[in-house]
Image (tube, helix red, strand yellow):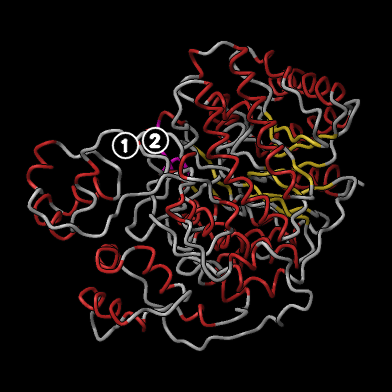
């Protein structure tokens, strides 16, 4: 069962997620979060250096290369800490005057950020061979415990920057994650960065010592520790792929009323707010739910800007599991889980570097395993955060090259993880196909045929790339209704797929919802009959701001009627959907009853 989803897909989701404040991708290099990986990742996911991604960080200008190999502490003294971070870690270009000013600094370890897919991160360690092999037939019995008290040591940004300069990013990450012990020279070199009697060999995360850490331990520490793939082996061996039923449902509801202000009046997480609690809707104890969360109040939960928000999403999802026990599918997108920031407290950019992508998958794997062991059909989706959909490309031709050289490689890694975890459904695209193309900087000046060609290339190339590695169901997302000539998207072919999921985002009132559905369902019906598809609805919400904000519709009185009428029309289609996910708010007991009787109890 699903609670919330990143609002990067389809219409405007009302999910409050930590990623909503991320710096827009168009101002950053493709990878600005972390450098070389100290974490073992599958060797087959590394792209040769000659196929590196295009960059927007000015890498063709040699001035930055004259600075990034110099001693960081010296750069700090001459340029200041903030400016040094911008150049060394943020991808900014120094001025000629700055290059002259630091010319007297001695050489140090290079801290330049590797391009995504480069061989800079190819130093794979202990668990790469396990990852690409079969899981153990007789897994280790889960339950290793690590006795430690308090909070494990985690480096502050100043600690991390000092340690990177002293022994290197890759070395520190590998040591902290327990992949290897430090050398005597590394212990000595790191001592200048550690205080209070700490030594480098004493800051290793305690969970790294366990062969098979319990899932609840891993979940509790997912912000400060990502399990190695070899540590997940004992849990993976207990998994099996479930049969997908003829009709599946998932309920993705806020436990309290969450509203979103109009986009032109707010930004990021500030758009989200708590609006009220209606305890009569729920059979469970809503007060007890709050007491089990890390948020101290529902107002705090609604704002989404607090440590522990991701864990509260899962807690609330388990609450709705009990409310809708007939629901059988589960999906929370990968971007709802940490890591959100790197060791220097910079927000992680998309596409993620090899290191951060693999680390995010290892944390996400904890959740997938927990859901599978609870009996739910799982769906692996790496939706990108809003505002980060633009790729470093200037035209459709560059977009195709970027897909070949960067995107497919990352999606192959996801496919291997999805297969390893016996995931049932996998969407290897960051948003609906059409919306990803339309988010590119060149979309407004491209012809319809160029847009359609880019979308078809994205769809087919990614699918062909991941199929050899994943035996479950690959499901693309689509949203066929657009202000810009929606007719071109009806030509997008899905003939090679078994299922496509479409999203429905009506607005205003019952009358306009009926008109909207007539257009949407007509296009969907045409596509699924033409390509002989099954289809599902990935998101079907009544957005508070799209109804109350635009037209003053009282959803507390009308949500049951609007959703009921939508379901009538949906199931009248010549090909009925094989699954429906509902997300957002429940507005009344009647609204709950309509969904429960006509959707969750549907056979």
Contact flag, marks 1 and 2 (Cβ < 8 Å): yes
Q: As displayed, is residue 335 above or below residue 526?
A: below
Q: Residue at x 64, y 64 (%)?
A: 131
Residue 445 in the image: x percent, y percent? Answer: 48, 12
Q: As displayed, is residue 6 above or below residue 211?
A: above
Is residue 270 inside the magenta stretch?
yes
Count up the numbered dots: 2
Q: Residues within 10 Å of mark 2 (few under 14, many from 20)?
A: some
Which segment did they paint magenta?
Answer: 265-272
Q: Gap between marks 1 and 2, in whole Å?
A: 7 Å
Q: Residue at x 19, y 54 (%)?
A: 70
**372 or 301, which lies in front?**
372
Q: Residue at x 23, y 73 (%)?
A: 193
The residue that label 2 is drawn on is 55
Residue 598 in the image: x percent, y percent? Answer: 85, 42
**339 or 398, which lies in front?**
398
Q: Residue at x 70, y 72 (%)?
A: 235
Residue 208 in the image: x percent, y percent? Answer: 50, 78
Q: As displayed, is residue 506 above or below residue 79?
A: above
The residue that label 1 is drawn on is 59
Q: Choose top left, top right, bottom left or bottom right for residue 12.
A: top right
């Amino acid at each position: 069962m699903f609670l919330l989803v990143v609002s990067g897909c389809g219409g405007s989701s009302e999910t409050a997620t930590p990623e909503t404040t991320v710096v827009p991708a168009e101002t950053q290099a493709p990878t600005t979060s972390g450098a070389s990986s100290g974490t073992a990742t599958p060797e087959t996911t590394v792209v040769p250096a000659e196929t590196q991604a295009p960059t927007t960080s000015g890498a063709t200008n040699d001035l930055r290369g004259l600075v990034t190999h110099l001693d960081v502490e010296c750069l700090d003294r001459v340029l200041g800490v903030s400016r040094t971070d911008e150049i060394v870690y943020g991808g900014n270009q120094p001025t000629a005057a700055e290059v002259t000013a630091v010319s007297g600094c001695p050489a140090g370890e290079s801290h330049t950020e590797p391009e995504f897919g480069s061989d800079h991160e190819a130093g794979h360690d202990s668990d790469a061979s396990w990852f690409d092999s079969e899981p153990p037939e007789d897994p280790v019995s889960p339950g290793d415990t690590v006795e430690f008290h308090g909070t494990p040591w985690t480096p502050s940004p100043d600690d991390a920057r000092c340690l990177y300069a002293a022994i290197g990013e890759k070395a520190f990450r590998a040591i902290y994650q327990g992949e290897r012990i430090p050398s005597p020279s590394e212990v000595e070199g790191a001592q200048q960065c550690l205080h209070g009697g700490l030594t480098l060999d004493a800051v290793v995360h305690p969970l790294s010592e366990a062969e098979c850490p319990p899932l609840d331990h891993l979940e509790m520490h997912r912000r400060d520790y990502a399990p190695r793939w070899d540590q997940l082996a004992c849990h993976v061996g207990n998994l099996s792929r479930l049969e997908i039923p003829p009709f599946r449902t998932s309920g993705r509801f806020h436990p309290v009323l969450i509203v979103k202000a109009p986009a032109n009046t707010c930004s990021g997480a500030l758009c989200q707010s708590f609006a009220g609690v209606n305890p009569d809707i729920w059979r469970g104890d809503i007060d007890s739910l709050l007491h089990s969360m890390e948020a101290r109040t529902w107002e705090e939960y609604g704002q989404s800007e607090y440590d522990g928000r991701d864990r509260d999403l899962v807690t609330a999802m388990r609450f709705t599991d009990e409310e809708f026990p007939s629901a059988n599918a589960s999906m929370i997108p990968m971007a709802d889980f940490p890591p959100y920031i790197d060791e220097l407290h910079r927000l992680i950019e998309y596409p993620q570097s090899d290191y951060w992508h693999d680390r995010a998958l290892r944390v996400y794997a904890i959740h997938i395993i927990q859901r599978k062991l609870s009996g739910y059909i799982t769906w692996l989706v790496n939706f990108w955060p809003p505002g980060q959909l633009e790729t470093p490309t200037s035209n459709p031709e560059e977009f195709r090259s970027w897909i070949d050289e960067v995107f497919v490689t990352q999606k192959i890694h996801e496919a291997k993880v999805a297969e390893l975890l016996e995931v049932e459904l996998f969407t290897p695209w960051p948003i609906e196909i059409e919306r990803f193309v339309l988010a590119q900087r060149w979309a407004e000046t491209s012809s319809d045929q160029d847009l359609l060609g880019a979308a078809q290339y994205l769809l087919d190339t990614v699918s062909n790339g991941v199929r050899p590695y994943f035996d479950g169901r690959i499901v693309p997302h689509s949203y066929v209704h657009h202000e810009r000539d929606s007719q071109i998207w009806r030509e997008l072919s899905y003939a090679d797929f078994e299922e496509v999921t479409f999203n429905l985002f009506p607005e205003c009132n019952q009358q306009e919802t009926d008109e909207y559905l007539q257009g949407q369902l007509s296009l969907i019906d045409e596509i699924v009959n033409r390509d002989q598809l099954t289809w599902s609805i990935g998101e079907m919400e009544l957005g508070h701001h799209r109804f109350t904000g635009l037209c003053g519709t009282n959803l507390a009185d009308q949500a049951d009627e609007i959703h009921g009428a939508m379901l009538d029309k949906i199931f009248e289609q010549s090909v009925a959907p094989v699954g429906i996910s509902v997300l957002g708010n429940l507005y009344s007991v009647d609204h709950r009853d309509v969904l429960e009787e006509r959707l969750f109890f549907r056979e």
